[in-house]
Amino acid sequence: MTAAHRTMTRDRSLDIAVTGMSGRFPGAPDIASLWVSVLGGEVLTTRFGAEELAAAGVPHHLLATPGYVPVHGALADPYRFEHELFGISPREAELMDPQHRLMMEAAWAALEDAGCAPNVPGPTTGVYASASSSGYLRAMLTSGTLDHAGVEQALRANEPDYMATRIAYRLGLTGPALSVLTACSSSLVAVHLAVQSLLQGECDQAVVVASAVGHPQVGYLHVPGGILSSHGVCRPFDAEADGTLGGSGVAAVVLRRYEDALKDGAPLHGVILGSAVNNDGAAKAGYHAPSAEGQEAVIRAAMSAADVPGDSVGYLEAHATGTRIGDPIEWSAATAAYRGIGAGSGQIAVGAVKANIGHLDAASGLVSLVKALLVLREGKVPPVAGFHSRNPLLDDGSPLTVPTAARDWDGPEPRRAGVSSFGIGGTNAHVVLEQPPARPAPQGPTPPADRLLVLSAANPRALRDSARRLAAALTRGGDCASVVDTAHTLAAGRATLPHRLAVTGREPAEVARRLTEAADRVPDKAAPSGRRASGPVPVVFLLPGQGSQYPGMARPFARVLPGFADVLEECLQAFGPDLERRLRPALHDPDHPAAGTTRTELAQPMLFAVEYAAAQALRELGVEPVALAGHSLGEITAACLAGALDLPSAAAFVAARGRAMQSCPPGAMLAVAVSERQAEALLAQAAPHIGGELEIAAVNTPDSCVVAGPTAWVEAFRTWLADRVPTRRLHTSHAFHTSLLAPAVDEVGRAAGNLRTGPTRIPYVSNVTGQLIMTGSRIDPASLVAQMRARVLFGPGLDELAERFPQAIALEVGPGRALSPAAEAAGLTAVPLSPGRGRRPVEEMLGALGDLWSAGAAVDVTPLCASGRLTRLPSYPFHGPALIAPEASATAGTTTAAPAQPSVPPAPHLVVAALWQEYLGHPDLPGDADFFDWGGDSLLITRLARRIVQDLGVQVFPRDLMAARTLAGQTQLVADLVRAAGPARQEEPR
């Protein structure tokens, strides 16, 4: 049976897909950079100078010791941390082990790479975390600067018990969260445990993450006979090998059950076919010694679990520490294992990433896994860095061979590999991998179409960098070549963060250019570091009246808004067959005669149907308005959306209203850029000159009114005004909201009697009063008859909305932008959903939704980008400051005498502000800063209460501080307690 046939018939139900990867390594800021260096056989470790080592705190006497080796696989910026992304205060981040910080970022990036947004509902995700021993914690505990409470806080921030659960908490992951520690094999053991958890159904997705960061990153003292190299060079399997050396880095992978991953359409990095873990037990020379029998057994067990023969494996990423004893034992064990299950001589190329970056201790197994996955995915076999000649203790005729130059894969197909990791103490792990399956091509070519692309970040700098990195990736092509897939991945596979931008486009070059332009417009100013988003920005729906309609106006709504067409159809059915037959072509055909859509009997049902359907579709996208404001006809739409009217009776009323108005005498309407009072004065002055007095039909802003009446009088008034006041003739056939509509009152009144009303569920503006109709109210149908003739007080209504919802965005839900200027004049931010009738109306509407999302509204953009597939995009550009706790710095052991206590107790506001800065790390916070939004928790509240008692001598309870929450609130609470305590408090012992 051929290998290909065996693969086709093999049971895939126990396979595990690797859907995401991320990492930072010595000399390589990401996985792509690591691969380039590994393929080139580069050594990425760092040899430090004496000044660098002295600055890092290495004692002079140690530097002068002959056996000191100044080499380490150093990680750039190991203390840099994007703490505000995770809602962590600077002080908490300072106390946290840098390894834990790096794992948090790596887990985030790996989930993004897998197309799974952190902190949103998704598959049940487990966390399996490993880290090396914390030199950072040791430095803090030996500094002598921490009090008892500080020690407890440092332990919680550094001990391994909390690293997996902290990641789960900060990323919103609800599966098992386990810290896995088995020395050097920790992270590959964690992979095995994650695989078992997936197969047993404990989770549907798993993040395996591991880090190793020396604190500080310096050299080491070589001990003769030890495992560390005397030369500072790791040469696995080489005749000159004399040991390993330390390195720093972090890696993460995301795992899914194979069949689930294929079903979700995620691109794969590779497949885990099987894994195994065992221990050497006592059958070895000593506790620290390796065992050939244990290593052979774990390889055989993993291959058995994978259910593949030995002759199907072409690569082995070895543990390969470069020690004189360990390498021959590993070679012998792997030789026996693979030869015993059918591997031929020289069939398996051996890899050893420690030769490139050093030994990453607890993270080394995961880094080896990442490298092996790259070998299989890319079909390239890298050389072992620095290899010159084979160690003579290695068996001849082995299935293993050491590559000395990069070459294309020439082994068995499909490409398969093993990964070994062996821990001091004897816990061995082995994983069997296979190349990722070929991804099916999209079904048929996708015609160019406008797409919405959204980006967000925790701060402006990261947002700019995200936009520029994505623009560069789109320019390069590759995975980002499809704008459709890129748009889908950004919407479905990225978290929604406070700072946002959105662009539209069809082609990669167009999108890249717009991303770059948008990045240049991102402001530098941001909310102070660490502040969490306080919730979505409220939205008010604006619903325009007659004059905005045009032929085919439903088409862009139907093409952009999911669910719009179904609700529109419901509205059309509610109008009855005759009107439905006339409305359908007018709504959908851009070439429909425009004159027909100006007729009131058609225009008003058209607008009602489109506005109602668009508003309901927006609600399905998560845009739930806090209030509604409709102009003229738009008020009826608002009442229906608010629950005050039901749809069938409202549609019948709109149809009757339109017919009745159509039968009224013709008239005209003129927008005049003056206040209501000025308009009244001008009309009174003009009446003798124009043949009669016009009426004010609407008050839209403090400086804008609409006057209306007989067409001849309106034109005469316009002529009389000349250039004194800006005017604009509106596209209407009647003088709405004037006495010219009197003939329609009886018919509209009869229709109003059939309206079915209910309690209002959303506040909306009454055009008659200019005030809000509040939740729970029931309207009198007769008021809608009066509204037809009454002056539209739309401007005053907007003023009340702006007063009640000052941060709201006014979304004009309908064709055109007639109401947006009025909303802006009231102080609201306005976004017209379908701003015009341009060449690309779909792009305009997508852009409006992007603007709404960018402004902070709750818009689920995923359905707008549902047609693409997940693809690989640049991950979050982590920045953040370098954070080192003073207690953990090189000079942390030096202390100064505490200043004498002042004879007069300090002012409460100074004490509370100082304690906030001490515990949260934020200076100069505003009075409305919320303790919990800025990174505080219940434990810190307890410490805060204890310190206030110590520093001010007044008893304050944690529950009261929790209730006060803000800096101003807690300051006032403490000040009141101090005032109540009176002078006696000064006599209390401090």
Image (cartoon, helix red, strand yellow):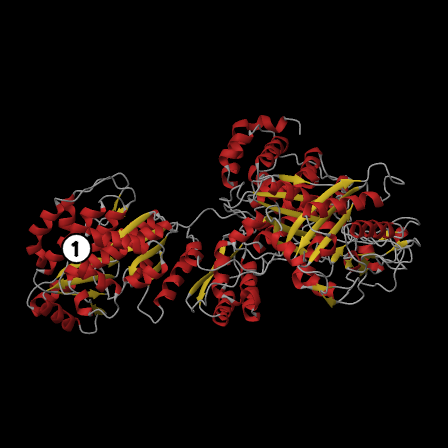
Q: From the viewer's perspective, is residue 558 above or below residue 966? A: below
- Quadrant occupied by the C terminus: top right
- Quadrant occupied by the N terminus: bottom right
Q: Is residue 611 left or right of residue 125?
A: left
Residue 400, given in percent of the width and then of the height, sits at: 81, 57
Residue 899 visible here: yes
Dot 1, crowdedness within 10 Å: few (<14), some or many (≥20)? few
Residue sitting farthest toward the front: 1
Residue for badge 1: 577
Place residue 565 in its image quadrant. bottom left
Q: From the viewer's perspective, is residue 783 above or below residue 990? A: below
The front one of 428 and 715 is 428
Residue 213 visible here: no
Q: Residue at x 41, y 57 (%)?
A: 864
Residue 370, given in percent of the width and then of the height, sits at: 69, 55
Residue 622, given in percent of the width and then of the height, sits at: 39, 49
Q: Is residue 736 left or right of residue 276?
A: left
Residue 723, given in percent of the width and then of the height, sits at: 21, 74
Q: Is residue 3 left or right of residue 633?
A: right
The amino acid beneath tag 1 is: Pro
Place residue 549 in its image quadrant. bottom left
Q: Residue at x 51, y 42 (%)?
A: 930
Q: Of helix, strand and loop, which one carries label 1?
A: helix
Q: Is residue 466 left or right of residue 626?
A: right
The front one of 890 and 660 is 660
Q: Residue at x 11, y 60 (%)?
A: 662
